[in-house]
Image (spheres, rainbow, N blue to C red):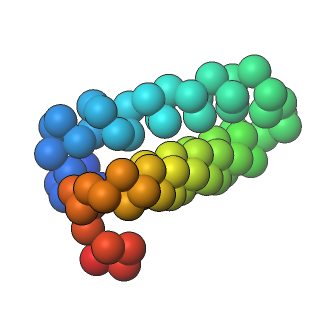
Amino acid sequence: MYALVKSLTLRAMLMEQLPVFAASWVIAEFFYKFKSFTLECAAFLVTWFLLDAAVSTTRRLLSSASGRADDPPAGL
């Protein structure tokens, strides 16, 4: 978590991670009722990861379709 916060700028965190984080939190709050903090926390983190991956992939596909090269190639 420290590496994530350290590697991203404040703007990147607010524009990219905060909306995905908030959506994941809402999904976890409404749908995950496992009666176990550990399971609910793990499900929240998996949800956050999957939503972020979907948003990042969509953003990359849209930017490549429009001819923009703002995003670095995957894996960098």
Quadrant where the N terminus sits is bottom left
Q: Is residue 45 visible?
A: no
Quadrant where the C terminus sits is bottom left
Residue at 26 percent across and 68 percent down: it is 72
Q: Is residue 26 visible?
A: yes
Residue at 69 percent across and 31 percent down: it is 28
Image coords of residue 39 (percent x, y): 74, 47
Q: Residue furthest bottom?
A: 75
Q: Nearer the viewer, residue 66 or 9?
A: 66
Q: Is residue 30 left or right of residue 9?
A: right
Q: Is residue 43 left or right of residue 14?
A: right
Residue at 51 percent across and 51 percent down: it is 58
Question: Which quadrant of the structure image shows residue 36?
Answer: top right
| Rendered view: 64 above or below 42 | below
Image coords of residue 48 (percent x, y): 56, 45
Image coords of residue 50 (percent x, y): 61, 53
Q: Is residue 62 left or right of residue 7?
A: right
Image coords of residue 10 (percent x, y): 16, 37
Q: Nearer the viewer, residue 23 or 6?
A: 23
